[in-house]
Image (spheres, rainbow, N blue to C red):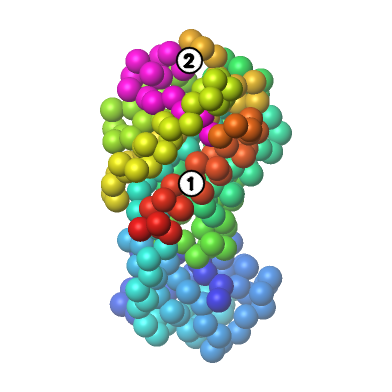
């Protein structure tokens, strides 16, 4: 069943007004009509089965049939920090990372990032990434849309580290040297409700200087197995590992 994220301010009693792109999608793409049902997820994470009552040029007007009990979110809050990659790789990371349960995404301006964001165009890029996150969250039946933040420097990233319970940095040199246990140990002691931040380098990887600075700030460097993963694959590996450990093994 089609799912839409709706601002709580558009809910009044049991009446829901769906506007903007979502109204267009319902009316013009899916060509739905009165009497059909959708799921609306509100800002507070609550989901409701909604019956469409009327479709106007301004809004889709619906009525809450029943509230739903759903457990869709990862038991920990994971922030993915990605060294700015080339092309559309960041879009891929946001889309697939959302499907796998990430809570937020932070682009990272690392030493080896080839891509340079024009500050004048940054807002439009973030808006597009946020839209991708919203659509992926709807597709994967989540009750939370991950946030996509403005790019940060290493100094800004280090300043934010104190806000997290678990700090990890994926470093390919650890894998090359045969490190196998750091991620496993972190997953074993990870508690539900914990906030986790994981840093990944761009295509060229992180520099030794960056990794040293992250370690000094409390990050644990970990390998991701014997194979070297692409910058867009590594975050998905970690999210899958966390989900397996906390959602399937629990």
Q: Nearer the viewer, mark 2 or mark 1?
A: 1
Q: Which residue is mark 1?
A: 241
The residue positioned farthest toward the top in the image shown: 209
* Mark drawn on residue 201: none
Q: CB under 8 Å between callouts 2 and 1?
A: no
| Circle 2: element type | helix
- Decide if residue 170 is in sight here: no
Q: Residue at x 54, y 39 (%)?
A: 235
* Mark drawn on residue 210: 2
Q: Is residue 122 magenta?
A: no
Position of 121 compared to 105: left or right?
right
Q: Between disc 2 and disc 1, whose residue precedes?
A: 2
Q: Quadrant of residue 40?
A: bottom left
The residue closer to the viewer here, 118 or 154, is 154
Q: CA distance from mark 2 to mark 1?
A: 25 Å
Is 165 drawn above or below residue 61 in the view shown?
Answer: above
Q: Quadrant of residue 48?
A: bottom left
Instruction: Name the spot of residue 58 as percent of width and height, x first.
Output: 55, 70
- Decide if residue 22 is in sight here: yes
Is 247 drawn above or below residue 129 in the view shown?
Answer: below
Instruction: Name the spot of residue 220 as percent of width and height, x first.
Output: 39, 26
Instruction: Name the spot of residue 25 as percent of width and height, x first.
Output: 62, 68
Q: Residue at x 30, y 41 (%)?
A: 189
| Circle 1: element type | helix
Q: In which quadrant of the rendered image does the C terminus lie?
A: bottom left
Crowding around mark 2 (Cα neighbors within 10 Å: few <14, some 14 to 19, many 20+) is some
Instruction: Name the spot of residue 10 as percent of width and height, x first.
Output: 40, 67
Magenta span: 211-224
The residue closer to the viewer here, 219 or 41, is 219
Q: Residue at x 37, y 66 (%)?
A: 71
């Amino acid at each position: 069943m089609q799912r839409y994220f709706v601002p709580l301010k558009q809910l009044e009693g049991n009446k829901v007004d769906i506007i903007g792109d979502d109204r267009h999608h319902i009316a013009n793409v899916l060509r739905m009509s009165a009497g059909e049902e959708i799921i609306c997820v509100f800002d507070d994470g609550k989901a409701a089965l909604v019956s469409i009552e009327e479709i106007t040029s301004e809004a889709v007007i619906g009525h809450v049939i029943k509230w739903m009990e759903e457990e869709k979110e990862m038991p920990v809050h994971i922030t993915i920090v990605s060294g700015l990659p080339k092309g559309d790789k960041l879009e891929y990371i946001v889309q697939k990372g959302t499907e796998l349960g990430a809570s937020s995404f932070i682009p990272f301006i690392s030493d080896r990032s080839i891509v340079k964001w024009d500050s004048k165009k940054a807002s439009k890029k973030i808006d597009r990434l946020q839209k991708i996150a919203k659509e992926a969250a709807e597709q994967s039946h989540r009750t939370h849309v991950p946030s996509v933040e403005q790019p940060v420097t290493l100094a800004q990233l280090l300043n934010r580290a104190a806000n997290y319970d678990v700090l990890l940095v994926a470093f390919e040199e650890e894998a090359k040297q045969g490190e196998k246990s750091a991620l496993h140990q972190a997953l074993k002691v990870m508690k539900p409700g914990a906030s986790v931040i994981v840093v990944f380098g761009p295509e060229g990887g992180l520099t030794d200087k960056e990794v040293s600075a992250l370690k000094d700030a409390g990050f644990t460097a970990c390998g991701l197995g014997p194979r070297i993963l692409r910058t867009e694959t590594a975050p998905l590996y970690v999210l899958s590992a966390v989900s397996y450990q906390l959602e399937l093994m629990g």
